[in-house]
Image (cartoon, grey):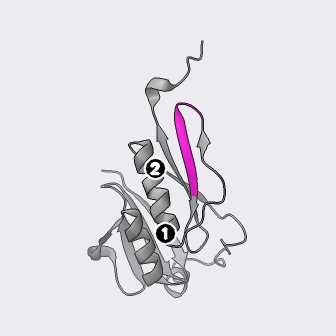
Amino acid sequence: MKQVFINLAVKDVEKSLDFYTQLGFSVNPQFSDEQTKCMVWSETIFVMISSHEKFKTFIIRPISDTKNSVASWFALSVGSLETLNEFVENGLKAGGTEPTPIKDYGFMQLRNLEDLDGYTWEIFFMDTTKIPNQD
């Protein structure tokens, strides 16, 4: 099975743990310790949130200042427009920000959510039955 592990350097592991838990992620204790939490989105997608100190043990370049510049952009699909809105609203209640308004392309709606450290998540719902013909 192929899996995706997204590694994020965070300033406060516990606050980020609370944030991602409120979004609906669960914790995999097998890959977690005091400085790193393995947040589970699905059977194949995981987000590793690590303290700056722990993150630095894996890299040689400086950690990006994601509050002032974009280092990456992650997209997650959800199964309905209601789930999309619930996900983002939960993120806003947990301290995240929504830098742009919802985008509606008819067949796809998407919203952006920035976490506590400024990482950008694009959450989208796509109804493939509504994709316009390319004829």
Q: Is residue 93 above or below residue 81?
A: below
Q: Quadrant of residue 25?
A: bottom left
In the figure, is residue 56 to the left or right of 49? right
What secondary structure is found at the residue carrying circle 1?
A: helix
Q: Residue at x 28, y 76 (%)?
A: 29
* Residue at far left of view: 30
Q: Main secondary structure of the magenta part?
A: strand
Counting from the top left corner in percent of width and height, residue 131 is at 52, 25
For the residues carrying marks 1 and 2, which lies nearer the camera in this image?
Answer: 1
Counting from the top left corner in percent of width and height, residue 76 is at 47, 51
Q: What residue sits right under mark 2 in the picture?
A: 84
Counting from the top left corner in percent of width and height, residue 98 is at 61, 60
The 10 Å Cα crowd at callout 1, few under 14, some 14 to 19, many 20 or more, is few
Q: Does 115 lie within the magenta span? A: no
The 10 Å Cα crowd at callout 2, few under 14, some 14 to 19, many 20 or more, is many
What secondary structure is found at the residue carrying circle 2?
A: helix
Question: Which one is in front, 52 or 59?
Answer: 52
**Mark 1: amino acid:** Lys
Residue stretch in magenta: 105-112
Q: Residue at x 60, y 66 (%)?
A: 97
Question: Which one is in front, 73 or 123?
Answer: 123
In the figure, is residue 107 to the left or right of 22? right
Q: Residue at x 52, y 78 (%)?
A: 58
Q: Residue at x 49, y 69 (%)?
A: 93
Counting from the top left corner in percent of width and height, residue 84 is at 46, 49
Q: Does 109 lie within the magenta span? A: yes
**Mark 2: amino acid:** Leu
- The numbered mark at residue 93 is 1
Q: Number of labelled discs?
A: 2
